[in-house]
Amino acid sequence: AQRVTQPEKLLSVFKGAPVELKCNYSYSGSPELFWYVQYSRQRLQLLLRHISRESIKGFTADLNKGETSFHLKKPFAQEEDSAMYYCALMDSSYKLIFGSGTRLLVRP
Amino acid sequence: DAGVIQSPRHEVTEMGQEVTLRCKPISGHDYLFWYRQTMMRGLELLIYFNNNVPIDDSGMPEDRFSAKMPNASFSTLKIQPSEPRDSAVYFCASRPTGNNEQFFGPGTRLTVL
């Protein structure tokens, strides 16, 4: 079955600390994976996708097919990074399957 | 471009009433998606359209839910009759062919009393 798992509901770190938001997936084909972010009172928006292999707002995510993971990382967290983060997988019919989300709280 | 537009932003209704949620996708986007977000189940895809045609409605919870897309710039999600367990945030999203990034609307927060 296709599934995206985000094991942490809440991740709390101090400003300047490294951040890693975990995402594991279950998919039989070649997945296309995304990270979406929802800041307070804003709409859900794309943060990055694995095919782009880019860094957005200091965040990176590497697809590890052996571990079926797509963890989101940032070396130095900022207060403005506080938000809800969703990992998502696109299946062969272009449907997005979302994880349950992780709330990141960056404390000053 | 105002992005995906949804109305109303908030809806409070009583059990048994009909509820209609509206969505205007971004111009030129030929895919439209309806999602429901709850604390218990997270973000779930309800139905999606391509070129105004429903492609997959397997996520629609039951017959009380229906969705239409009469033209490229408008879609509705209707719940009749509504029940308290339908309380959730309903998101609409759209994307163009050739780009897998979905653009989300601000959502409609529905409360059924």
Image (cartoon, coloured by chain):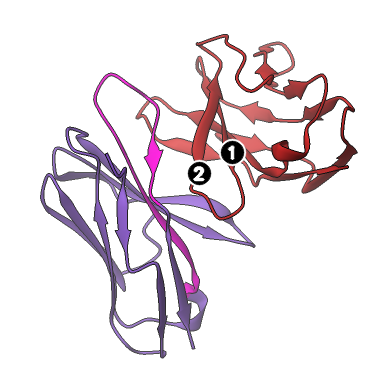
Chain colours: A red, B purple
The subunit letter for the residue under badge 1 reads A
Q: Amino acid at mark 2?
A: Leu
Q: Are marks 1 and 2 on the same chain?
A: yes
Q: Residue B9: x percent and y percent?
A: 39, 67
The residue nearer to you, when weighing A50 against A96, is: A50
Quadrant where the C terminus of chain A sits is top right
Part of the protein shown in magenta: B86-105
The residue drawn where x is 80% and y is 27% is A20
> What crowding class fits label 2: few (fewer than 14 Cα within 10 Å), some (14-19), or many (20 or more)?
many
Secondary structure under badge 1? strand
Q: Is residue B23 above or below residue B111?
A: above
For residue B36, side relative to residue B95 (left or right): right
**Residue B89 magenta-highlighted:** yes
The residue nearer to you, when weighing A16 against A23, is: A16
Residue on which the image places disc 2: A44
The residue nearer to you, when weighing A42 against B21, is: A42
Q: Residue A5: x percent and y percent?
A: 68, 37
Secondary structure under badge 2? loop
Q: Residue B45: x percent and y percent?
A: 42, 48
Mark 1 in CB contact with mark 2 (< 8 angstroms) = yes
Residue on which the image places disc 1: A37
The residue drawn where x is 90% and y is 28% is A17
